[in-house]
Image (cartoon, coloured by chain):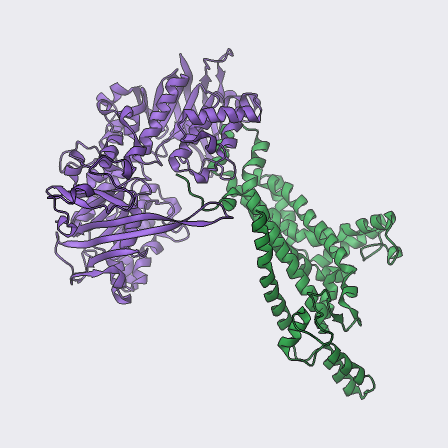
Amino acid sequence: MLYYIARRIFAMIPTLLVISFLTFFIIELPAGDYISNQIAALRATGESASIAKLEFLRQEFALDKPFLERYLIWVGLWPGPHGFDGLIQGNWGWSFEFDRPVSEVVGPTLPLTIILNTATILFVYIVAFPIGIYSATRQYSWADYGFTFLGYIGLATPNFLLGLIMLYLANRWFGLSVGGLMDPRYIGEPWSADKVLSVLAHLIVPTIVIGTSGTAAMIRRLRANLLDELHKQYVTTARAKGMRETHLLVKYPLRMALNPFIADIGNLIPSLVSGSVIVSVVLNLPTVGPILLNALQSQDQYLSGFILLFVAMLTLLGMLVSDLLLAVLDPRIRLGGRVSP
Amino acid sequence: MNVLTIDGLTVDFQTGEGATRAVDDVSFAIPQNRTVALVGESGSGKTVISQAIMGLLPKAARIVSGKLILNDPESRLKPVDIAQLDPESPQMRAIRGDRIAIIFQEPMTSLSPLHTIGDQIGEAAELHRNVDGNQARELTREMLRLVRFPDPQRALDAFPFELSGGLRQRAMIAMAMICHPALLIADEPTTALDVTIQAEILKLIKDVQQELQMSVLVITHDFGVVANMADEVVVIYHGRIMEKGSARALFKTPGHSYLKALLNAVPRFDMKPGERLVPIRPIELQAGGLLTGGGRKTITAGKPLVQLQHVSKSFLTRKGSLLSARAREFLALDDINLTVNRGECVGLVGESGSGKTTTAKAILRALPIDAGRILYDRGDGPADVAHFNREQLLDYRQRVQLIFQDPFSSLNPRMTVNDILSEPLLIHKIGAPEERAERVRELMRLVGLDPRYLRRYPHSFSGGQRQRIGIARALALNPEFILCDEPTSALDVSVQAQILNLLKDLKSEFGLTYLFVSHNLAVVDYIADRIAVMCRGRIVEVGPTREVVDNPLHPYTKALLTAVPEPDLDARLDFAALDANKASEPALWPAPYTLREGDVPLLVEEEPGHYVCAPAFAKETHKTALEEAVL
């Protein structure tokens, strides 16, 4: 098993390289780069004083080098102006727009992003599972229809609208400050119990908003999957043994219906990051989503490149986790192909 | 004493169009330590009765009236009426799996693939016997030994998908037996299994019954199984009991016309030449003008149409776990030599995994072969199928068609019958639209279906009707050679007789040639002119049907023949003589039939036209050349 995990992690390296190349290639597709655009803008307005500084920056970041070389320097496989100094060496690059290293720009938002995403995934699973199971076992009951209806509303409501409404209500009823992931008082303050509580309180609205459509979709899928399994012969076999209905449900059909959801963990992560951009903008959440959007608009290439690569990395990790979980949970995958007399 | 007494049981199904009566005033009793067989076609309500006894009726079903009195000889409790119990109540759960247990038809799907055999079997003991995990494991091992698992200790931690169908059914039996039930319900326990395995499972049920002194209710449509298992027989038709009584009385003097009809529909070895089965609902063959051959070049009847010469095929199977995948070669076809002459029906018989279907697929060129040649004569001399160019292949595809085993999965559920039947014509660009429509209608009439059904989807047809649609589809292109891959093994006896007669009539009407793949020797005996017996990828015996059935030479053929349960009380299976494992192990065959790893399975002519695989004889005076062997 350890060997298998090591092999999988090893196999991730070429995948990451290919992804990084594609990312870099796509980001560089628009003509020019952040600095040359800047220079052009300055030229147009007749200001030439700071052009020299920008030209210096261009050389500093090897933007005058050919494409392939720029890529290799960025990754850290080719000596740049300062020797080997790229992603591999731990240098995440420079954000031109913020005029700060990428690590400083992105750094504070990463933990919050991960917290928010984890909370959302947990929310999706915790809410979707009981409802999905309930709907499947009581198919065509009033509650089933009710949840189905709610689910469709959840799928059809634009997230940002739901977010605004909920923020308003949270502010009116509970006096929560609008927007952000914590009360404005705590921004920049050292961590304290009050700050943690404030973050938790502010997490509720975004989690629900971002998670609703995912929850609704998952309820539908779980219901359909479980309905397929419930009529399988092995469920009848278990029932014929005299098992209690709930115990039976969890042990047999639910286990079978789980596979697609475990396989989905890897896919969930990028869709949550990219799907929550608008919500993050609307709710003013300090996550990477809005920064990514901004960086892409202003061709802040190293910043956007790093974020995209980060998400890809998360996805690969998610895939690895789901593959390992599948192998643990499903003997057919673990022992696949074994033939016995 | 009667363990279970059913009295006036009536079950209704609530459907969109109101209530349908599935079981109507059924009464019979199951005495202690006796076997009662419940016989009927599919849809007759036999499974509904078993579900009612288990308290496992589907939601739409309701017991309208009647009693199901369980009188458990072991418990000191008063008899209980199961019909009065709430199916989900603790009392019912305590009975289910403990006092009454069931085994199902499909061993492949009735076990959860995600849990070990030991876990699933031991669970029943944990539920009813107040034992902890370790004791349950001990009991399970004991049970697995009782049902003769080759290695009970290892089987405890095996997953169902690692076991063969026969072993899975054994595991199911172990699961049903672990609490020593008073009544075992066996719902078509051997329908999905090979004859040799079937005989073993039947023997096993009998042995365990002896040992545990329990009553058995066998639900089946196979009179061979009835004759070998039952003390008493209950015949059911459309939810009503037609006839009941002791097996001896019923077989000797079937009183009701329905039972007589059912018995007449079963193929038997002692049928006279030319005797036809009498299906309950016969089809009149109505051949029209459109389907009598095109202007194609063909060879005359009796000449070799298909010749397989030294055909070999092996598959790679992965062995070991995911982490140490290692390829292992599995020889599916080993030096197969077989000829099918135009106008004859060759039956290909063997257990599952013997290579029958692989042979059919190889002939279709649906599967590349590793060695050897497959020759097909399209009227201009034998030509290698593998070397057909696009145009020749297209012509070949029109000439050779396939009828599948499973009528349920071989028809696309989203296509109407009209689409299904006209698709081959569309693919081969045959005829104008009106012509095609006329032809499709004629195909429907040919297989005895009303052309008005053309706009329906497959789900609205019964299994037999779907199989007829499959046959019509195979006939759409005027083929000359049809590969029938177990076309009746998923069907009831009465429907089987209907389909077999239809195939026979079509053959004589259109001069078709069949390769009829089946594991049922009685069926092959009825339809085939010659029989080829396969075992482990080798042909072990070839000869004229009568010759092979009456005078089997090869030990494997003999074993197959003795394992067929005949619908005759005086010809019961000799359970003591059964040893299926030994019979299908080529290395254990007695001389001169012994085949060791690497031996070439040579066929020698033992009697005129009757060949048997005996490599040891090859050096002597016997003729061996197979090119001669094929008439």
Whole-percent x and y of residue B592? 19, 38
* Location of residue B38 (image quadrant): top left
* Above or below, comparing residue B349 to residue A51 in the picture: above
* Above or below, comparing residue B309 to residue B206 in the picture: below
Residue at (30, 28) in percent of width and height: B225
> In front here: B438 or B597?
B597
Whole-percent x and y of residue A172? 84, 51
Q: Is residue B256 left or right of residue B164?
A: left
Q: Quick check: can you spot residue A20? A: yes
* Above or below, comparing residue B253 to residue A114 in the picture: above
In purple, which chain? B
Q: Is residue B287 left or right of residue A81?
A: left
Q: Quick check: can you spot residue B474? A: no
Residue at (43, 20) in percent of width and height: B183
Whole-percent x and y of residue B446? 24, 49
What colour is chain A? green
* Location of residue B591 (image quadrant): top left
> In front here: A318 or B32?
A318
Whole-percent x and y of residue B128? 54, 22
Q: Is residue B430 left or right of residue B87?
A: left
Quadrant in which the C terminus of chain A appears? top left
